[in-house]
Image (tube, grey):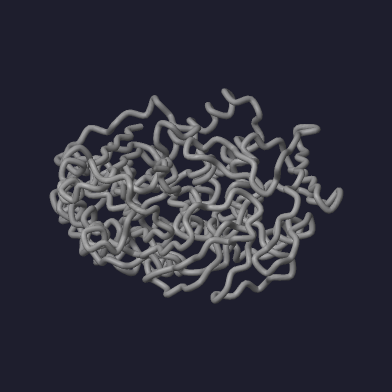
Amino acid sequence: MVVFSFFACGNRSEEKPSSINISVPYELDVLDPHAKTRVSNYAISSNFYEPLVGTDETNKILPRLAKSWENPDAYTWVFHLQPNVRFHDGKIMDAGDVLYTFERLATDNNLEVGSYLNDVQQVEALSSTTIQVRTKTPLAIFLNKLNNVLIVSRGSSPLVNTTVNGTGPYRLTKWTPGKIIRMVRNNDYWGNKPSIQDVTYFLNRTPQLAVSDLVAGRSQFVQYDSKKLEPVIRSLGKYQVMRQDNYFLKYLSYDVSRSVTPYSDSKSNPFKNPLVRKAIHRGINREHLIGKLPTFAVPAFQPVPPFVFGHNPDIRAPSHDIDEAKKLLVQAGYANGFGVTLFVRQILEETGTLIQEQLANIGIQARTKVFPDTEFFKMLDNQDFSFFLSRVGATVGDASDILEPQLHSRSSHPGYGVRNYIGYSNEKVDKAIDESAQILKLEDRRKALEGIMQTLMEDLPWIPLYIDQDVYALHRSYHWKPRHDSLVFAFEISVHQN
């Protein structure tokens, strides 16, 4: 982890600000806090809704709507709710709302957040302020998963895309999809009220747009993730800069299930052939890529970074070898390479260009097409792709966070494979994921997850590229600590005391 900051000298007697504008690289496509498991949705929704338990910037579990909890046995969790918590509409929150939230997620398979409750067997209200949850198996990371489950008011389904009604520290005032979301402090909030009254998130901001927001004074806090723009920030003389390793893997992936794939020039799907996948893995020069990246980064050779539970330290970097990559393509039947369209998330546009250049070196002609998140994920949901560049993060600090929804085949087990866009299926991996969820001894579970990582790097459903560092610039009037999960919660920002 690397964190650094610098402060410019200035007059601390300035009037304390009551508002803040924040420029972020992602956008929000739905206000329902259960609809999607995307970081962008959770980052915004968590200002309006709250989980039973939360985490701090180090992933330490903290009380939220549950003031305390205990484990009577390995299968049972009892949560005691905070008193006098009100939803934004004034209704008192009680155990019935928690019960309703769990039932909603258990019965609607379209709600992706339900994947975090896959192992829940039974939920019951022991009183108006006490909830008991029983899991199907012992679950060591149950609290980590609950952090992602935001509580809604019972009877509120279907949730509409114009209003929110949570218990959180902020209320929604305006949302313009793809552009801005505005919120105001909830003055009836049950907990410690945020020090900032009004907050505006500028959405879908590229690093250049984010820094232009800073220069023009439109924003006081930006996530800009760009090496070349740091001198511009320094020249402004009134910002602290922070850098933090994050959970997120940048990776290439592809359609591995269809015999013919729609955006490839080849008559058959090249990505079904493991030799093609291995050729890409060997043909990518990660050190060279990182050197040219606009962001700070470290190379990645498996789906999770070293500080996530389940990372396998024995997996070594593949030797970069263009000649070997070309030989693998010849063995796969693609002596002349092939052409394909590479779909790229807008936040990774520059990475896409660099990958395009490296793929050309081994004979793969990639035509990049860049999309904002809403369009990008819609195409993935509809399997309207052949080859894509994206990012993913095990934000609960455990490898199961990506293994279960994204690398397990689609299953009758709710949530398993819910984001397995590529059609990857390996019975050995499925069985290992299923078994690992039931292992209580940490070292045994660690070994099981490390074994899954080894198998995945043999199959190569994904080509890991790099883990980067988030970079933030924050006006010196404010205080905030960066997180491994890249989340920017307005309620965690405070105003410096003079």
Q: Residue furthest right?
A: 127
131 or 140: nearer the viewer: 131
Q: Position of residue 26 (x, y in %)?
A: 37, 60
Q: Is residue 104 left or right of residue 422?
A: right
Q: Position of residue 458 (x, y in %)?
A: 39, 38
Q: Is residue 212 left or right of residue 257?
A: left
Residue at image location 50% in from the left, 38% down from the top: 397
Q: How many marks?
A: 0
Residue at image location 53% in from the left, 68% down from the top: 172
Q: Position of residue 414 (x, y in %)?
A: 64, 55
439 or 411: nearer the viewer: 439
Q: Could you tell me which quadrant the N terminus lies in?
A: top left
170 or 362: nearer the viewer: 170
Residue 54 in view in this figure: yes
Residue at image location 53% in from the left, 48% down from the top: 408
Q: Is residue 403 left or right of residue 367?
A: right
Q: Residue furthest front?
A: 13
